[in-house]
Image: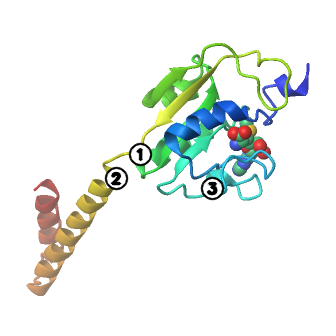
Amino acid sequence: MNVHFSSKTDLWSTPESFYQKQNEIYNFTLDPCCTTENRKCEKHYTIDDDGLAQDWGRETVWMNPPYGREIKAWMKKAYESSLLGATVVCLVPSRTDTVWWHEYAMKGEIEFIKGMLKFGDAKNSAPFPSALVVFEASQNHSLAKHDADVRRSALTDAMTTVFNECDCDCAYRAIGLISDKLEA
Ligand SMILES: C[S@@+](CC[C@H](N)C(=O)[O-])C[C@H]1O[C@@H](n2cnc3c(N)ncnc32)[C@H](O)[C@@H]1O
């Protein structure tokens, strides 16, 4: 088997014309999994940086991950990064029977690609179908942070009130007050 068609290879570079069409729509700012040769964005992470360990912030991310077992970790990272404010467009094999597909891909917008892509410098089409999975940046991440800040501040106020008026059952009163505040 040609190594380029092995699921173990991570050399499935995106066809340039296919990438450009998506880039016209999204205007990508980060490629988190690439080599310096096949990177799609100025800002990028190679295996030496370990893109999985980086914060993808609020970038617009083009993610064509390694296609081995590690694909699950990349899809998890893509989904979770979208909850924190990144928009992530993933080019992945359509493996609709897998755990990662059901746990993560199905949380995104899925576009099945007609025909098979020709990856990298390959003359032949890939022997598997591909899909684009789009995780839009969550609009709720800043609201969630605001909510957490309000709750933290309410807790601090409650604790201060209790310990300022401290008597022997202050710990129980603190717990009661905290519970009331959290349920409010
Ligand atoms: C399918 S290729 C995609 C390359 C390029 N992003 C593209 O779209 O053409 C996956 C790339 O991920 C890189 N890679 C593998 N593990 C990585 C890691 N932990 N962090 C960053 N890049 C990694 C590989 O070297 C490979 O070039």
Please name the residue that numbered disc 3 is placed on: 53
Q: Is mark 3 within 8 Å of ligand 1?
A: yes
Residue contact at pointers 2 and 1, CB within 8 angstroms:
yes
Between discs 1 and 3, the one toward the N terminus:
3
Residue contact at pointers 2 and 3, CB within 8 angstroms:
no
Q: Residue furthest bottom?
A: 164
Foreground mark, 1 or 3? Answer: 1
- Asked whether, in this view, residue 96 is left or right of residue 8, the answer is left
Question: Mark 2: which amino acid?
Answer: His
Which label is found at residue 141?
A: 2
Residue 48 seen anywhere in this rendered image of the structure: yes
The crowd level at tag 3 (other Cα within 10 Å; few <14, some 14-19, many 20+) is few
Question: Mark 1: which amino acid?
Answer: Ala
- Asked whether, in this view, residue 166 is left or right of residue 59, the answer is left
Query: Could you tell me which quadrant the C terminus lies in?
Result: bottom left
Q: Which residue occupies 76% across, 23% down?
A: 118
Kindly report the distance in space between the C-alpha atoms of the residues bearing marks 2 and 1: 9 Å
The crowd level at tag 1 (other Cα within 10 Å; few <14, some 14-19, many 20+) is many
Q: Which residue occupies 61% across, 20% down?
A: 94
Q: Which residue occupies 85% across, 27% down?
A: 4
Q: Quadrant of residue 144?
A: bottom left
Please name the residue that numbered disc 1 is placed on: 137
Kindly report the distance in space between the C-alpha atoms of the residues bearing marks 2 and 3: 20 Å
Front-lying residue, 113 or 147: 113
Please provide percent x and percent y for residue 112.
Answer: 55, 18
Question: Mark 3: which amino acid?
Answer: Ala
